[in-house]
Each structure stands twice: as structure tokens, then as C-alpha cells.
Amino acid sequence: MAVQAAQRPRLLQAMVDAFRQEDVRRKLLFTLAMLVIFRFVAHVPIPNVDRDALKSAFDQNSLLDFLSIFSGGALQNLSVAALGVYPYITASIIMQILTPLVPSLRSLQEEGEQGRRRVQLYTHWLAVPMAFVQGYGQILFINQQGGNVVSDFGFQNDAIGTFATLFTLAAGTMFLVWLGELITEHGIGNGVSIIIFGGIVARLPSLIPNLTTQSIIGIIAIAAFAIGLTYLIVFFQEAQRRVPVQYARSAFRGGRMYRQQGQSHIPLRVNMAGMIPLIFAFSIMLLPATFASYFTNAGGWVESAADFMVKQFQGGRGGSGTGIYWIVLFLLVIVFTFFYTMVQYQQQQMAKTLQKQGAFIPGIRPGPPTEAYLMRVVTRITWAGAFFLGFVAILPFFIGLLTDVQALTVSSTGFLIVVAVVLDTMKQLEAQLLMRNYEGFIR
């Protein structure tokens, strides 16, 4: 029996060990229960929705599929949770950008846990009006794509009904944020990410029947695509540049003070921005076609220009679309990756923290020289992360050129989210096991 236990696969053994621990088992079951509640809410529709027109809207514009990712698929049902956690993500991004620019927010961030909770409260407040604005814009956009999807929507048609619909959508968003925070506090993993992850995974079974319509080559291409992309995502998500750091410690021995040298390192992630640049880029790419669509019947050169913008920037379903669309998307991802990475780096104030702790980088003087050195390192490694995210963004275009399997592929952005959430959740479960002297998942 001992030999059989030793030969048992390591991952399976770690799962058995996790369920043997009552508190870890409780966290896992709590997370699962919150996901079940989320999936139930995702199927509760708002009133006055034409299902056939809604399906037509999704067939005509692939960007609705991208927005549906962050609603956990609820946008496809136009449910009370149709906005998902997207307004909260937008509010979080805005607060992260404003924090280093606004002195009062920067001082709150430096006050410790209490200050960060205050900034988090401001983020929740900002998410509510963002939900109203995004809900209004999304329903107008869906109505434009699929006809009268939500009947009598608009303050000029039915102000009370429109406000009630927007209030319902905002309440659904904040309910999902609350579920996510409950998962973070009482479950396993980052709650908001788990909500997005649950929505993406829930859409996978609906793709299985389409496999019967594909050729063997198409199925092999999907498998190769999934395996290769998973490897790349894991590699770049875990890639780090470790900057060596030395520090001095003071110790009293026999009534005398001695200074001891210690060594450590600063782990600088290659992909410090995560999936945020993809969100920025796809959101920006939505705007040209949206604004141009209002002028498609204007006549003259205005109509011609609007038709060109819609054709070039609306993109296609799955991996289709024009070359201009994907080139601009690739460049935007790179720009936003550098922008958001620099915002994140400035908030960490690494050089100032090292100087306060009496630490230094060997061969680099503390203060501004250390700041300049770290900035050069971050800039160099961010090029790799930026090109990786750009490749992830435009990968459906190449898949569409090589095969005809667009209807089966989950977007590469969704794939990135799934793998990143799985990695983060496994790390947290690993920590739970190691605290209890069990062997974990990661070697």
C-alpha cells in the first residue's frame, strides 16, 4: 500500500491531500458554490429582449463575443449580469492610473492597509456610474447591430423603463463583485478572476457539438493551438528577471553591535501588465466602427468614409477580419503594455523602498542611480511581454488564415485569462498545502 501511495501521480495526491484538510475543503466547496450562484444569475434575463435579434447581433459583430468574456457569457443572454465585472475592472484601471497622479490618493495608498481599503471603497463607488454608462452604451450598440433587441430602450422612448434596466444591470455588476470578494475572502483564488474564469469555462460545452462539422486537420489544429498557447502563456506569465540585492543587518552580541550582510533579489515579471493591455486595446478598437456606423447613411464622401471604417475596424467573427484591424490592434497592445507597466512600476517605488531598508543593488549607488537602473531593466523585459501580448491578440487572425475553425476556438484572450487564473489558483492552493506540511502541485 505504501508503494502504491508513492507511485500515485503527484497532482492527484495533492488534490487528495487538499480535500482531506477540512478548512481547505471548505474553501474549495465555497468557491464552487459561489460559481453555481453566478451561473444561475447569468441566466436571469432582463425584460423586453428579442432573442432572435440578440443572436443576430452576436453573429454580425465578433467584438460582442469579447465583451461577453468579461460578463462570463451573461451578455449573450442579456441577463441581469450582462455587464459582468467589466465596469469594476474599468474603475480599477482608472483608480490605478489616478493614484500616482492625485496627491490625496497617493497619500492614501501609502498609509497602509487602511488607506488601501479607502481607495478600494472609491473604486466600488466609481464602478456604479461606470455600470450605468457602459450598460447604456452596450445596449444601444447591441440594438444597432441586431435591430430592436431591447424594445423601447432610450430615455427619449421610455425614460422610466430605461433607468430601471440600467439600475438592474448596475445591481447585477455589483452583485458579481460582491460574490468575487466573498471568494477572495473565504475561498481559493482571486474572486473577480474566478468569476471571469467560470464564465469562459461554462461556454466550452456549447462548442463540442461543432466538432462533428470539422475535418481531422481542423481538430488537430485546435489541439496544437491549445497546447502551444498554453505553453507560451505559462512561460511568459512565470518569466522573471531577478535583480540581485544586498542588505545589511545589525545584531547585538556580547554587548557589541555587528553588521551582517545578506542577499536577496527583486523578481521583476516579464508580463507585469497582465491582461489589462488586451482589455484597453479591444475597447479602443470598438470605437471607430461604433462611431462610423452612425454615418453609414449620411451620403456622399461621409458615407464612403464611414463604410470604410466599419469594414476595416469592425473585425470578423472568430479569426477573420482585415489586415489593418489586426495591425492596429497589435500596435495598441504594445503601447498599452508599456503604459500600464510603467504605471504599475511607479506605484511600487522600488528604489525608495530599497533605500529605506538599507538595501542596494551591487555596483549601483542608492537613490536616483538605482531608479534609473531598474527603469532600464523593466523597459527591456517589457518588450518581451508586450510582443507576447500582441501575439496573443492577433493569433486568431493567423488561425483563421490557416484553418477554418474560427467557430470552435475560444479567443486567445479568453485562453490567457483561463491559464492565468488556473496558475494563480494553483499557487494559492499550493501555499495552503505547504502550510500544513503537504507536498504541493508545483515543483
Image: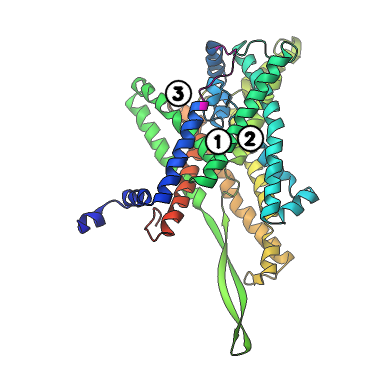
Camera-side residue of 171 and 402: 171
Helix, strand or loop: magenta stretch = loop
- Does 42 lie within the magenta span? yes
On the question of residue 44 being in view, the answer is yes
**Residue 267 relative to residue 399: left or right:** right
Q: How far apart in space, not on screen, are marks 2 and 3 (Cα)? A: 23 Å
Name the residue type under label 1: Ala
- The residue segment tinted magenta is 41-50
Name the residue type under label 3: Ala
- Res 312 → quadrant: top right
Q: Earlier in the sequence, mark 2 or mark 3?
A: 2
Q: Is residue 137 above or below residue 244?
A: above
| Point 67% across, 22% down: residue | 166
| Point 67% across, 57% down: residue | 375
Secondary structure, mark 2, is: helix
Q: Earlier in the sequence, mark 2 or mark 1?
A: 2
Residue 433 x/y as whole percent: 41, 55
Instruction: Identify the residue position indicated by label 2 in the image.
Output: 281
Q: Are marks 3 and 1 in contact (CB under 8 Å)?
A: no
Q: Are marks 2 and 1 in contact (CB under 8 Å)?
A: yes
Residue 129 x/y as whole percent: 72, 31
Q: Is residue 266 above or below residue 248?
A: above
- Does 26 lie within the magenta span? no
Secondary structure, mark 3, is: loop
Residue 393: assigned label: 1
Q: How far apart in space, not on screen, are marks 2 and 1 (Cα)? A: 9 Å
Name the residue type under label 2: Ala
**Residue 156 relative to residue 379: left or right:** right
Instruction: Identify the residue position indicated by label 3 in the image.
Output: 407
